Amino acid sequence: MDDTPDFPSEDPRTDPVDLGNDVWLIDTKMGGYSGITAGYLIRGERPALVETGAAKSAGEVVRTLAELGIGTNDLAAIVVTHIHLDHAGGVGDLAAAFPNADVVVHEAGARHLVDPSRLMASAATVFGDVLEELFGQLRPTDAQRIRVLRDGDNVDLGGGRLLHSFDSPGHARHHVGLLDSQSGDLYTGDAAGVWTPETGDLRPSTPPPDFDLSAALGSLERMRERHATRLLFSHFGPVTDVDQTLDRSVEELRLWVELVREARLDGLDLDHAVMRVRERTAERYALRGMPEIEHKIEVLSSTEANVVGIRRWLDAQSLVDAPDSR
């Protein structure tokens, strides 16, 4: 069966959305899809872009920033929650377009922005022939432009406004959460899963190689402790029911891990494990009769990738829990 994604043939413009508090949502149109990946401009004294989208989106992001009044020398910071290509693939292009901007990233991800070769090679093994069409190539960033984030560091937005960062692993070890001190917005990256605004569905994002259930649940608790006023999902958009949504994130993670655990104990191969998870979660999500949205979500966060990530974690746990055979 050919699993090559059928990309949209047209790429209409999507206007930025004013979310209040000088925050603008920018649809980065990954792979030509609307409503799949978001960047956010915080247009304060020191304007910052949170998430770049993929490299192929960089030109559109630059044009949208210009429409919002951000000139070549105006952007102060380009901040990414983690270095996966749908979040940070445009860093090199945007750093070149905005020469005064610091590139702000978790300390564990910084070296991969300086030399993306290993990151791109890893992505190629996952995405194969569609890598170029879906993401494009991550360009290197000068090491002198990069500022690393450690747990508890801040990004200065000017006028006393800060982005408070905190480690939020589980989806990726190089993942940070970001809390806006003025608006109370919490930028979730992928740590709280994938939100589908058309349906109100929330699915986990558990790809290899870094998924870790314990770390992911801990990160969700750290998010809850921030008492945010709103969650800003990179996939996709704002959510105001913060506690209820985080509860759903926990519920979905536990469910998917349990389904994959059962399939593994039953000896199912990957294809049959994926089929079982799809069958047993179908009624949870309001996607039936909405094939375009379902296809879009599968391109972004496929069931297979999520199952592979969980299986990898379960395999690692089995090794840790195995009795000493010496």
Image (spheres, rainbow, N blue to C red):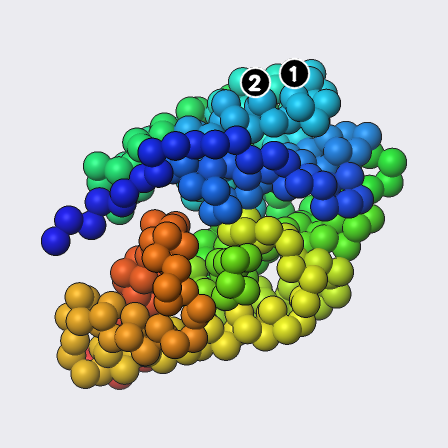
Asked if labels 2 and 1 touch by Cβ distance under 8 angstroms, the answer is yes
Q: Nearer the viewer, residue 303 or 20?
A: 20
Under circle 1, the secondary element is: loop
Inspect the image, locate mark 2, and give the three-letter code of the amino acid beneath it.
Ala
- Left or right of 275? Residue 56 is right
Give the x, y percent position of residue 125: 23, 43
Q: Nearer the viewer, residue 302 or 159?
A: 302
Q: Earlier in the sequence, mark 1 or mark 2?
A: 1
- Left or right of 102? Residue 120 is left
Is 195 situated above or below 30?
below
Under circle 2, the secondary element is: helix
Q: Which mark is residue 64?
A: none
Residue under label 2:
97
Give me the residue at 73% from left, 31% from top: 47
Write down the quadrant of residue 99 in the picture: top right
Inspect the image, locate mark 1, and give the three-letter code of the amino acid beneath it.
Thr
Q: Which mark is residue 72?
A: 1
Q: Residue furthest right?
A: 159
Give me the residue at 33% from left, 34% from top: 9
Residue 110 seen in the figure: no
